[in-house]
């Protein structure tokens, strides 16, 4: 599958600021580190508000990071299509995540005309150990034909 990037990390972040300004106002600060052919790397800083009892990063926080990573990689490859929406997301929690930075490395497994499928590895604190793995499917809006 040959993939072409239509927006780099800075362009996706600017587009989200334009069409989805609340994307970074929910208490957790997301970052888009890189978008490359077939892949995106995103980050978040897990603060006290994102921890569950026991001091580990909460499941909803990791789930949100996985969904955000999928959205970022898809937008990077399809361009300005804000109406791409999650239709399915499955996550496996593998080990505890300590407070601090978490990253999602998301691969685009399929990019069709109506569906995109991704796989996301989530790691914490610079470790190579997976703390979660997620698979997401997004529905893409139909292409508009002008004529």
Image (tube, rainbow, N blue to C red):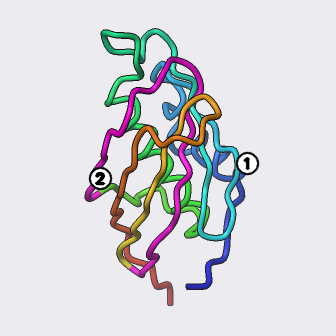
* 67 on left or right of 106: left
Say which quadrant the N terminus sits in.
bottom right
- Residue 89 is tagged as 2
The answer to whether residue 108 is magenta is yes
The answer to whether residue 42 is magenta is no
| Residue 142: quarter of image | bottom left
Distance in Å between CA atoms under marks 1 and 2: 25 Å
Write down the residue under mark 1: 10
Element type at mark 2: strand
* 43 on left or right of 135: right
Mark 2, residues whose alpha carbon is within 10 Å: few (<14), some, or many (≥20)? some
Asked if marks 1 and 2 touch (Cβ < 8 Å), the reply is no
- Vertically, is 144 above or below 78? below
Q: Nearer the viewer, residue 145 or 77?
A: 77
Question: Could you say where residue 99 lies in the image, as x and y percent from the top left?
Answer: 51, 17
Residue in view at x 62 percent, y 78 percent: 3
- Residue 142 is tagged as none
**Mark 1 or mark 2, which has the lower sequence index?**
1
* 72 on left or right of 52: right
Residue in view at x 50 percent, y 84 percent: 146
Question: Could you say where residue 144 lies in the image, as x and y percent from the top left?
Answer: 45, 78
Residue in view at x 43 percent, y 63 percent: 118
**Magenta stretch: helix, strand or loop mostly:** strand
Q: Nearer the viewer, residue 45 or 53?
A: 53
Residue range corresponding to the magenta coloring: 87-113
- Vertically, is 101 above or below 133? above
- Vertically, is 59 above or below 144? above
Mark 1, residues whose alpha carbon is within 10 Å: few (<14), some, or many (≥20)? some
Question: Could you say where residue 19 lies in the image, as x and y percent from the top left?
Answer: 53, 45
């Amino acid at each position: 599958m040959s993939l072409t990037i239509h927006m780099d990390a800075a362009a996706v972040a600017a587009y989200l600021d334009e069409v989805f300004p609340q994307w970074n106002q929910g208490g957790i600060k997301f970052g888009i580190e890189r978008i490359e052919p077939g892949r995106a790397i995103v980050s978040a800083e897990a603060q006290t508000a994102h921890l569950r009892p026991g001091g580990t990063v909460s499941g909803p926080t990791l789930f949100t990071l996985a969904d955000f990573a999928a959205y970022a990689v898809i937008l990077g490859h399809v361009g300005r299509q804000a109406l791409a929406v999650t239709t399915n997301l499955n996550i496996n929690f593998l080990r505890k995540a300590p407070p601090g930075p978490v990253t999602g490395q998301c691969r685009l497994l399929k990019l069709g005309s109506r569906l995109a499928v991704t796989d996301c590895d989530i790691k914490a604190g610079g470790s190579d150990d997976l703390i979660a793995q997620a698979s997401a499917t997004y529905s893409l809006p139909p292409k508009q034909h002008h004529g």
